[in-house]
């Protein structure tokens, strides 16, 4: 069976971008954080930091214990998106545009067609890709390349040699070439599935590979087990259609926003971002969930169902009602809001009452969205989020690349507002001093 996919996985991408842009960080352990606070966690760690055991999700204070020389830097999502597009352009120098598929901000799969499926041509192409990336993105942003008979195995190969690796998995070497891996090294086997495999007596990748398809169907509880078996043995299957299950945002709060008022303001900003994305995707939501995390304590969660809608004013009213149920005043660590029960706009039944109000809401939301797209997020916003406009900037999820232009403009607006707020605080402090001094 021929090779069909070349998979590019950027090594420690966020931290590598920081090292590329700041030569003083090169060769040093670096942790990237969403906010500069000891109570937050690393969202990325450099290759050097990983050698000390620092990983994504490691608390900053724990990371410093593991690696006393760790350099902690704030995340710059807009820059990561900018270089992602530069990397994509570099790949498209070597592949037709339609043959490059973005999996996430640091993963891209490239189709191999024709003579490129031969090992020698595929390996030469991998070298050309690495050279293009060094030229257009930078020599410090390295990638591991995996080549295999399907995307699943090419991705697996890209994880087998890091950093800056190149591994080819050919059909003739399967499945023995996988036997040295752990079960959780395979994409699709998380903690829950790992537990199910162990419960069915499958403890190694060798045992997994030797299990017949019908047994894996039983383990997985459906056809996905047979699909996993086929991919594991080199078969290329069409990607199953996916349907978005939710739209939402979460944010680890900076210390100045860990009060009840600060957390509520951030949640209202996050909800407005989610509502705008909902409308951009031509979707309506029918359920809202809110989550508030505390340090070392159980989180507070609440949800509300409603008739399918995308109106920011309606969603803000529902959020306000939910937040009224949270009466505690404990310091908050992180917040999140998500919209569920999504349906395409055309699939929802029309409103029986209030058509005029609904048309007015659509028109208002449309104007707000157009202005924010043109001039930057939060140029116009609904009340309640004002105190958090400088909080919760762009975040990058696993499979969604934000619009850098919109977010960069938003950053400029937020910086201006932050400076304005700082000036306001200083003026108020000076006023209090004058009053205290009797002047």
Image (spheres, rainbow, N blue to C red):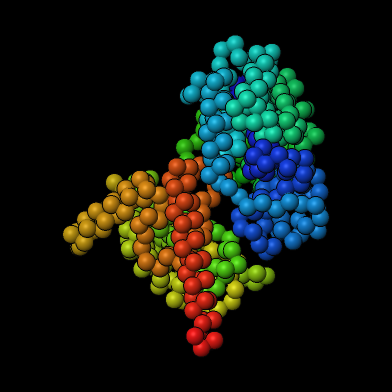
Question: Residue drawn at (77%, 28%), measured in percent from left and top?
Answer: 177
Quadrant (top left/top right/bottom left/bottom right) for the N terminus: top right
Q: Can you tell which quarter of the image residue 386 is in?
A: bottom left
* Up-down relation of residue 126 to residue 19 (above or below): above
Which of 174 and 198 lies nearest the eye of the viewer?
174
Q: Can you tell which quarter of the image residue 151 is in?
A: top right
In the image, farthest residue toward the bottom = 438
Q: How many marks?
A: 0
Q: For this view, does 313 lie left or right of residue 151? A: left
Residue 156 % position (x, y):
68, 33
Q: For this view, does 349 lie left or right of residue 157? A: left
Residue 326 % position (x, y):
50, 76
Question: Residue drawn at (32%, 58%), measured in percent from left and top?
Answer: 311
Residue 422 % position (x, y):
51, 66
* Up-down relation of residue 283 to residue 298 (above or below): above
* Up-down relation of residue 404 to residue 340 (above or below): above
Q: Is residue 226 visible?
A: no
Question: Residue drawn at (22%, 58%), measured in percent from left and top?
Answer: 360
In the image, farthest residue toward the front = 439
Which of 76 and 245 lies nearest the eye of the viewer?
76
In the image, farthest residue toward the left = 356
Which of 288 and 401 lies nearest the eye of the viewer?
401
Q: For this view, does 315 lie left or right of residue 294? A: left
In the image, farthest residue toward the top = 115
Residue 65 % position (x, y):
81, 58
Question: Residue drawn at (72%, 47%), measured in percent from left and top?
Answer: 30
Q: Is residue 316 visible?
A: yes
């Amino acid at each position: 069976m021929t090779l069909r996919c070349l998979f590019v996985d950027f090594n420690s991408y966020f931290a590598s971008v920081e090292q590329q842009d700041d030569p003083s960080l090169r060769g040093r352990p670096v942790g990237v954080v969403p906010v500069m606070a000891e109570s937050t966690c690393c969202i990325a760690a450099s290759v050097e930091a990983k050698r000390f055991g620092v990983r994504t999700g490691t608390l900053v204070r724990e990371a410093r214990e593991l690696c006393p020389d760790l350099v902690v830097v704030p995340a710059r999502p807009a820059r990561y998106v900018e270089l992602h597009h530069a990397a994509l352009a570099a790949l498209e120098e070597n592949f037709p545009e339609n043959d490059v598929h973005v999996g996430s901000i640091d993963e891209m799969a490239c189709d191999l067609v024709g003579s490129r499926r031969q090992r020698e041509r595929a390996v030469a192409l991998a070298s050309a890709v690495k050279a293009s990336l060094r030229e257009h993105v930078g020599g410090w942003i390295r990638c591991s390349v995996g080549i295999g008979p399907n995307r699943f195995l090419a991705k697996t190969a890209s994880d087998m040699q890091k950093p800056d690796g190149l591994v080819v998995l050919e059909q003739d070497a399967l499945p023995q070439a996988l036997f040295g891996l752990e079960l959780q090294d395979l994409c699709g086997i998380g903690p829950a599935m790992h537990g199910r495999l162990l419960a069915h007596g499958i403890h190694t990748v060798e045992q997994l590979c030797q299990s017949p398809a019908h047994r894996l169907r039983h383990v997985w509880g459906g056809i996905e087990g047979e699909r996993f078996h086929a991919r594991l043995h080199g078969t290329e299957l069409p990607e199953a259609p996916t349907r978005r299950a939710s739209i939402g945002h979460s944010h680890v709060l900076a210390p100045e926003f860990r009060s009840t008022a600060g957390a509520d303001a951030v949640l209202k900003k996050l909800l407005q971002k989610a509502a705008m994305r909902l409308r951009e995707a031509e979707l309506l939501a029918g359920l809202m969930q809110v989550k508030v995390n505390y340090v070392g304590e159980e989180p507070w969660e609440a949800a509300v169902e409603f008739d399918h809608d995308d109106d920011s004013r309606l969603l803000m009213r529902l959020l306000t009602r939910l937040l009224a149920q949270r009466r505690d005043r404990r310091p908050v660590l992180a917040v999140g809001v998500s919209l569920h029960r999504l349906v395409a706009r055309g699939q929802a039944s029309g409103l029986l009452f209030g058509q005029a109000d609904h048309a007015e809401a659509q028109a208002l939301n449309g104007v707000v969205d157009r202005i924010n797209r043109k001039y930057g997020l939060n140029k116009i916003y609904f009340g309640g989020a004002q105190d958090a406009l400088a909080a919760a900037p762009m975040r990058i999820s696993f499979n969604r690349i934000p619009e850098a232009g919109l977010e960069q403009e938003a950053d400029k607006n937020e910086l201006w507002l932050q400076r304005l707020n700082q000036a306001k605080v200083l003026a108020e402090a000076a006023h209090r001093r004058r009053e205290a001094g009797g002047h």
